[in-house]
Amino acid sequence: MTLFTGYGFWNPLLWLAGAAGVTLLGLLFWSRGRRDYRRGEGELPFLSGESVPGAHVGGGHLYWGFVEGLRPYVERLRGAHTGLVNDYVGWLVVILAVVFLIVLVGG
């Protein structure tokens, strides 16, 4: 039941045991969680030590520092994004072709 290759071996039973171990570890962490948690107040935004009822904190606020620091790069990238799936698939095909050429020439 073990597959030997030139780079090691693959045993599905070991992977199954590893997945079961990770699942059990996750369940252990989950079971040690707080029992007194109640929905409501714990879900409100908490900014700089102040409780802000009714406020909405969007994803743009979370990454503000990164976007501000990389503003020139981000502005150049915004021009390349059209929002059309056909353009993104085209770029994917071009990049995959380049990667395949690199692999074929380098190998």
Image: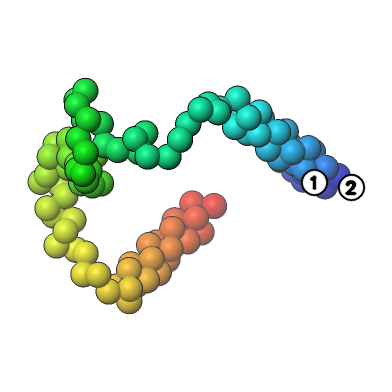
Residue depicted at 42% across the width and 66% down the height: 97
Outermost residue to the right: 1
Indicate the secondary structure of the residue bearing disc 2.
loop
**Where is residue 8 drawn, in percent x and y?**
75, 38
> Mark number for residue 69?
none
**Where is residue 5 drawn, in percent x and y?**
77, 45
The vertical placement of 30 against 7, above or below, is above
Query: Is residue 78 or residue 23 the one in the foreground?
Result: 23
**Where is residue 24 drawn, in percent x and y?**
70, 33
Residue 23 in which image quadrant: top right
Question: Count of labels shown?
Answer: 2
Sequence-earlier tag: 2 or 1: 2
Task: Characterize the local packing of mark 2: few (<14), some (14-19) or many (20 or more) Cα atoms within 10 angstroms.
Answer: few
Going by the image, does 66 lie left or right of 88?
left
Cα–Cα span, label 2 and label 1: 8 Å
Going by the image, does 26 lie left or right of 100?
right
Going by the image, does 14 lie left or right of 44?
right
> Mark number for residue 12?
1
Amino acid at the residue labelled 1? Pro
Residue depicted at 54% across the width and 52% down the height: 107
Task: Characterize the local packing of mark 1: few (<14), some (14-19) or many (20 or more) Cα atoms within 10 angstroms.
Answer: few
Q: Are marks 2 and 1 in contact (CB under 8 Å)?
A: yes
Residue 11 visible in the displayed image: no
Residue depicted at 47% across the width and 61% down the height: 100
Amino acid at the residue labelled 2? Met
- The mark closer to the camera, 2 or 1, is 1
Residue 72 visible in the displayed image: yes
Residue depicted at 16% across the width and 50% down the height: 74
**Where is residue 60 drawn, in percent x and y?**
20, 46
> Mark number for residue 1?
2
